[in-house]
Image (cartoon, helix red, strand yellow):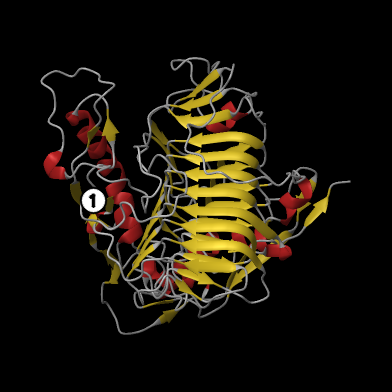
Amino acid sequence: MYATFFLFLAVSCNETVIDPETLTPSTAELKDAVIGTNYYVSTTGSNSNSGLTETLAFATIQYAAGFTKPGDNVIVLDGTYTTGSNATFGYITRPGTATAYITFKAKNKGRAIINGQNNLSSYGFHIVTSFINIEGFEIKGVNTMGIALVGASYINIKDNNIHDIGRLCTETYIGLDAIYIATSNHITIERNLIHDIGRFGPGESGCTPTSDYWKGHDHGCYINGSNYLSIQNNVFYNMNRGFSMQVYSGENRTSSYINFINNTCENGNFYNTVQGHVVLYGSITNGVIANNIFKDQYSSAVHVAQASYTYSNVLITKNITAGGNGSTTYGTAAGVTITGNYNSTDPLFVDEANHNYALQSSSPAFSLGYNTGLTTDYLNSTRSSMNIGAYAPASVPSPTTVTPPPTTVTPSTSTIFYNVQMSATATKNDCGTGYTGSTVTYTVPAGYYSSKVSQADANNIAIARLADNKQYYANAKGTCTIIPSTSKVYYNVQMSATATKNDCGTGYVGSIVKYTVPAGYYTSKVSQADANNIAIARLADNKQYYANAKGTCTRIK
């Protein structure tokens, strides 16, 4: 379904040919520079600076990326970063090497926030090269993809919080994903928090979709024709518009050596009656889905779609499933072995309601798993290779046993302090004229942020994130209620706009495409102007997507 959208990239990027090898999950730290330069990015920086110190930092990640050579680090300081309309924060084209990766990282995990400003920007990172690390960012609010890998290889994505991607009204058939992976090889996705991905459905923010794309097109990780992938120690929740992972065979591609291991997936898709957290909807050679916790999906946790796809040496084992119909899989296929899973088994989370998926001491997930070889968990704490789920036993202290703060603030290298749970409310404030927004509670779960300084520092980090995100969360999750003023229903008039396809590769120019909102497509009980304004807003939201999906690329002669 994504093949057309990324065809230009397939033309302009030559796929690396990789010799077959055995995929071994890696929990080692991502490769840092061997000998390289540190470039700094700051919200108070300037692209006229040298970028070589924190006080002379650059202003944007994209500008810093243009200076990088193998072994370099782009260190992004604390703060909220924004960019322009339909822009990308980091389009990465310069490669590292096998012994000298280029690393883009937040100086402090979770404190460098890439904010697409409620769908103004299109991508967080778009990577079309090799030997790159992406570490420690919060990526939110972009309208297309948090991180896109196309024709990339040897990429490590770890310790990021990717959420609220593609949260808009749209009829596009193009998927809106946290992480998109096409024709790429040797990818590790580890210790990421991925949640609340995908477009609005009927009744959300006034949306009235006419297609069913909202039911299953937007995913946590989408894989198309890629090899040697390990998706491990991640937490996925609220994947209601798609799945934590989908494998697809666009242009009849086959993926190989796909490991989906030791992840925790909760509150999955409730709209596809045979699909849950993971969908195998493409040809796969060599794959392992093991030691995952799957909870609260419509029916089964994993959908194995036979169709015209072929499977070889795919193992689904030692997964815990709870909710739905209580079974691990829907469907079978030759080449897929399904064995030893724990159906209808409560994993006993510490505080599921507040997304704390650490495990209670009596959890069945502690030692019943498959030997995946992983030695660390979601928090980079030591685990037994036989544990199930993203968290090892006692990986997060409960709110009642948080280490007390020291009397003086003395940095410590041996003690890690975790925030206590805290909540705040905000009222949705982006409803149109004639509507009122609901009040929404936003919660930072216990143990989500950590500090080596003090308990107070860990709590202060959580307080800052609470303040940063509560309004955004209310606007994303709240509802708009019509303020009754009349019983009459108003319908929009037909309107059109043009946009130029802007995602062609170097050396190509995009065609101009006309996008039309038909008369009567949107309604309002407030006024004719309100109905038209809704249509105008959707026209602005969708015309560029439509142009990119329907337009053509012509080589510049």
Q: How many marks?
A: 1
Residue visible at 65% across and 23% down in the picture: 69
* Nearer-the-camera pick, 89 or 216: 216
Instruction: Locate the N terminus by quadrant.
Output: bottom right
At which x and y percent is residue 231?
50, 50
- Position of 117 with respect to 32 (left or right) is left
* Residue 371, percent from left and from top: 45, 50
- Say whether residue 360 is visible: yes
Compare residues 293 and 458 and report the one nearer the observer: 293
Residue sitting nearer the eye, 376 or 222: 376
The part of the image, by quadrant, that contains residue 486 is: bottom left
Residue located beneath label 1 in the image:
443
- The residue shown at (72%, 65%) is 252
- Tell me if residue 193 comes above or below residue 75 in the rendering: below
User: Is there any visible trace of residue 219 in the rendered image?
Assistant: no
| Residue toward you, 491 or 2 | 2
Tell which residue pokes out farthest to the right in this image.
557
Q: Residue 484 placed where, x, y %?
A: 26, 76
Left or right of 312? Residue 197 is: left
> Is residue 475 left or right of 175 when viewed as pictured?
left
Q: x, y percentage for residue 53?
A: 48, 15
